[in-house]
Structure formats: structure tokens, C-alpha cells
């Protein structure tokens, strides 16, 4: 070991008799700090692993719950997978950074998680809902946001879950947001959600064809949907139209 007792001395200047002890204490303290640092790094790694495991468990639970909700209504079979696929494909064209955010994919899949709070006789009604029933159904975005809000790593998903039924003209729900007040992710997802709804069978109507659905989107651009994002979505579908099987079941190739 290097002799530190001569540090800080010069010829003719007496050495402080306490200095060697102080220096030795500093060396011991440095060693202890190094040991603590290494221990803390180890503990941090363990804590990160536990946190990652908890996050994965929570997501698995939420996805299972969302899938159970979907399974209750046979007319929406595959809706979560399809809308997530449409939404991510569109997000990659509109804003690649948005598509790369893990919370975006989580939010797209969990968008209807609030339906867990909707009575089953309304959720699974084999026909059109009454106005009173629609009032209850329109509460699911708020319920969903309340379910997800306490989870810190899903914080960015809350706004999409709450606002995916807003309209560009302000006539949507739950908050009547208008235009660019609506979060970008929600404006993107609104196209995916609506297109899948239009091209899927419902108890009160048959699925419409892809061309008719795109015509509806062109007509509603600027009122129901963000006009710029609507144009991108129409081009995306025209460039790689899904098959009839993909619009009724399965996952879009664009999601890959």
C-alpha cells in the first residue's frame, strides 16, 4: 500500500502526528463507500427486476380482463387485436415516435377496459341500445381511465383511454374536446376503432365493405375525425387493403 503519511509535508515542516490516523480513516471510509455502492447497485438491479415483474403481471392481468370483457360480446371478437394493429400501423405513418412508445400499444389494447363497469345486460344486448342505455355505455372511457390512472408506468395511456370517443368537431364524449385539444394518440386510434366497427358485424347491422367504410371516413374527415390523419389512414388501407377475413378476425399484417 502506498504510504500517505508523507503527503502534504515539506522539508523543515513538522508532520502532524494525527495525520496518519486521519488518512487511514479516509482510506477505510473510501473502501466502505465502495462496498456500499456495489451493494446498492446490486439491490437496484434486484428492485428493477421485481418492478419489471410486477409491471408484466399487471399488464397480463389487464389484458386478460380486457379479453374476458370482449369475449362476453361475440360480435366484437378480435376487436382488441385488430384495432391495436390498425392503430399501430397508422401511428407509424403519422408519428413514428408515438408508435415506438410502449404505452401506445398498451393503451390501444386496453382502450375498452372501462367496460368492466358496464352492466352485462347493456354490454351484451342483442340489438340497438336505448338512449338511457347509451348514456350508461358512454361512461366506459371515464371508468377505464380511473382503472389505469393509479399505475405510474401506464400514465401516458390514460388520456387515450379517456378520449378515444371524442370527435374532431367537439361533439364526442366524455369531455367534448375539439380539434387539437384531443390527444394525438386518441385521434389516431379513433380511426382504427371506427374502421373496425364499420367493417365488423353488429347485432343491429351487417358489416359494410372496405370501400364503403373508407367513403364514410372521407365524408367524416374534419367532423368526426382529424382530417389529416383520416387521409393518411385511407391511403394506408388503399396501399395494403386487409382481406375480408382480417377485418372480421385475426391481426393485420401492417402491425408487423
Image: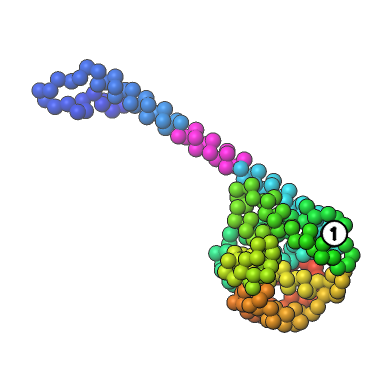
Q: In the image, what residue occupies the spot 29% across and 22% down?
A: 22
Q: Is residue 167 above or below residue 50?
A: below
Quadrant of the image for the N terminus? top left
Extreme-top residue of the structure? 17
Extreme-right residue of the structure? 126
Q: Is the magenta stretch mostly helix, strand or loop?
A: helix
Q: Which of 237 and 159 is in front in this view?
A: 159
Please tell me how crowded label 1 is: few (under 14), some (14-19), or many (20+) other residues with Cα within 10 Å: some
Q: Which of 98 and 188 is in front in this view?
A: 188
Q: From the image, tell me which residue sits under label 1.
A: 122
Q: In the image, what residue occupies the spot 81% across and 78% down?
A: 208
Q: In the image, what residue occupies the spot 62% across and 45% down?
A: 52
Asked if residue 147 shows in the view, the reply is yes
Image quarter of residue 45: top right
Q: Is residue 90 above or below residue 210?
A: above
Q: In this view, does 23 lie above or below 95?
A: above
- Provide residue 202's location: percent of width, then percent of height: 84, 70
- Provide residue 54's location: percent of width, then percent of height: 65, 43
Image quarter of residue 215: bottom right
Scheme by which the image is coloured: rainbow
The residue range painted magenta reads: 37-50
- Provide residue 46's location: percent of width, then percent of height: 57, 38
Is 169 on the left-hand or right-hand side of 204? left
Extreme-left residue of the structure? 12
- Provide residue 226's location: percent of width, then percent of height: 62, 74
Amino acid at each position: 500500500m502506498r504510504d500517505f503519511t508523507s503527503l502534504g509535508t515539506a522539508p523543515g515542516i513538522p508532520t502532524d502526528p494525527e495525520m496518519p490516523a486521519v488518512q487511514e480513516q479516509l482510506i477505510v471510509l473510501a473502501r466502505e463507500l465502495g462496498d456500499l455502492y456495489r451493494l446498492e447497485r446490486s439491490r437496484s438491479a434486484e428492485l428493477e427486476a421485481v418492478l419489471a415483474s410486477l409491471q408484466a403481471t399487471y399488464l397480463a392481468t389487464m389484458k386478460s380482463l380486457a379479453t374476458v370483457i370482449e369475449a362476453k360480446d361475440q360480435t366484437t371478437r378480435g376487436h382488441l387485436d385488430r384495432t391495436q394493429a390498425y392503430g399501430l400501423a397508422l401511428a407509424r405513418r403519422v408519428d413514428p415516435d408515438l408508435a415506438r412508445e410502449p404505452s401506445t400499444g398498451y393503451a390501444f389494447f386496453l382502450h375498452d377496459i372501462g367496460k368492466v363497469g358496464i352492466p352485462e345486460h347493456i354490454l351484451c344486448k342483442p340489438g340497438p341500445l336505448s338512449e338511457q342505455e347509451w348514456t350508461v355505455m358512454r361512461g366506459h372511457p371515464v371508468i377505464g381511465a380511473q382503472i389505469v390512472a393509479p399505475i405510474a408506468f401506464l400514465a401516458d395511456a390514460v388520456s387515450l383511454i379517456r378520449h378515444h370517443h371524442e370527435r374532431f368537431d367537439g361533439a364526442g364524449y366524455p369531455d367534448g374536446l375539439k380539434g387539437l385539444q384531443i390527444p394525438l394518440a386518441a385521434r389516431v386510434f379513433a380511426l382504427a376503432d371506427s374502421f373496425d366497427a364499420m367493417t365488423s358485424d353488429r347485432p343491429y347491422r351487417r358489416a359494410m365493405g372496405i370501400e364503403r367504410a373508407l367513403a364514410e371516413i372521407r365524408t367524416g374527415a374534419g367532423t368526426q375525425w382529424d382530417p389529416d390523419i383520416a387521409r393518411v389512414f385511407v391511403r394506408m388501407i388503399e396501399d395494403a387493403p386487409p382481406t375480408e377475413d382480417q377485418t372480421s378476425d385475426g391481426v393485420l399484417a401492417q402491425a408487423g
